[in-house]
Image (cartoon, rainbow, N blue to C red):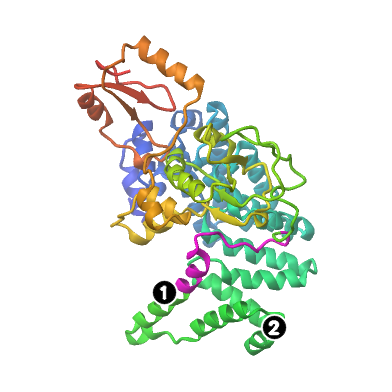
Amino acid sequence: MTSGNPIQDELFSMPNALTPHELEYMAYSGQYERAHIIFKRIPPDDWPQYASKYILHQVIWGGITKLRKLLAAQEEEAANAEKRFVDQVVRLFIHTCRENGHTPRELYESLLFWSEELINLALPHEALTYIRQAMELGSNKFPDLHVQFLSRVARIANDRGKLQEAFDILCGLSQRPYIITDRSLIPEVIFDLSQSALVTNQVQFYKQLLFLGLRFFYTSVEDRRRFVEQIRKTYRRSLRVLLRREITAGQKLLYALHWLYFKIPNFRRFGLGVINRGARFLLLGAVYALNYVRGEAFIGWSPRAQEPSGPFSPNGSPFAPDGPGEPTRSLPRRRNILITRAMGGIGDLLMMTPGIHALKQKYPREEIVLALPRRYFPVFENNPDVRLVDIEQEEINYAAFRRWFNFTDCPAARVESRTAPRVKKSRIEIFARALGIRGWRLHRMEYKPRYFLTEAEKAFREQFWLEHDLIGKPVIGVQLRADETYRNYPHMPEVVKALARDAVVLLFDGSPIAGYEMDNVI
């Protein structure tokens, strides 16, 4: 007898239980429906054995998908049971991560998925509980997810009639655009903020935000349509937009470009979709040029963006210079160059150093302030080219800087996504070009990453080399695993064994290393 569901029929014909490794592989390969069904057949007392980040992540997503299907079929009793199951798995995920002292991206994604579903189920209190747990656990390690958590808190506050609270949250985001890593989140934040500004009677700010929604670069045409429609409704007619004196010429041009685009008929019906694709390319190309041709970040979507109060919020702790490359305690009112980067990784940060050095040589009398999470400060320790600011703790008045390069919106990702699979430029060159390094400066630039050892690191190096008899020997360092598993090489033991024939191999990992008991391997 079959259930009518081919996945269920296949799974019910399988052995009663898979090993944790087998189920993890199934989850890692994205088979969330299968992982969900199998996990539900495992006794809850045995769940901790299967509590890997991949399994729990996919089981939760499978549960959400199942819950939606049950609700669509109006099977309320089964839907309630499924919700209880997902709640259990989410709590297990949180507990496991607390026990391990490690909170991976998959945990925050699961909490984001589930809180969104709870909001849609009209259960904002439960959603808020999970969102607060995510923030307490450190969701700010992943700025793109943290922004979405904050956006959901604002939405809940708005739905509860706490309009000022919602506005304050969204306004806080608008004052820190340098933490938004995903351009696709920009229209959501700006539009929600515009609506909060309107209901709190900040009409001029509301109108400004609508045009800024067109000004920023993101690729969703439907989000752009939403701003165009809102502008048209606000001013009653498109002609009024073009005639109003308080609207700048640039804003009028931007609106006109979008208005013309949305007036183009759908030529796809006649097999001429190339016309629509070409028009879309021209529109987005024009907006892209407005944002990125000069390399510097666009300033102006915060109501406080133009305050001349100095580089850092007076509400936060001021900074003062302690020494080259060291965290600072106070800065003069004006610094000329700001670089922001709300995330790692360490490799990208090192790839930035040649371009930053070339920028410092280009402007030797100007201070380069580098704002990034404090956990990455050691990468730039003793680096004379920069002063460091904790991007997660300080509210930076980016408008107080004459030049601002926002590398949270990663230039390497933009270039590589545009040119893949034939990426010809190295990340060192991409970052340097994004900093305005061109021509002979780019040609003569040192392409080697700059890292400055501390005295303690030098002493450790000498002692380690002496203790392991490495002086004069060829030594190769191998990082066994990446944070994203898809980047791991599956045959690393064989690689290490081959390298160890001719050199001493030093293995690096974030957890205890096992399975590499070989000669010449440390």
Residue 324 visible within the image: yes
| CA separation in Å, label 1 and label 2 | 28 Å
User: Local crowd at mark 1 within 10 Å, few (<14), some, or many (≥20)?
Assistant: few
| Residue in the foreground of this view, choosing between 509 and 428 | 428
Q: Secondary structure at mark 2?
A: helix
Q: In which quarter of the view is residue 411 placed?
A: bottom left
From this view, report whether residue 117 is shown above or below residue 290: above
User: Any mark on residue 235, and which?
Assistant: 2
Image vertical order of residue 55 relative to residue 33, above or below = above
- Residue type at mark 2 is Tyr
Q: Amino acid at mark 1?
A: Phe
Name the foreground residue: 105 vs 429: 429
Which quadrant of the structure image shows residue 18? top left
Mark 2 surroundings within 10 Å by alpha-carbon count, few (fewer than 14), some (14 through 19), many (20 or more): some
Image check: 354 left or right of 168? left
Determine if residue 427 is in view: no
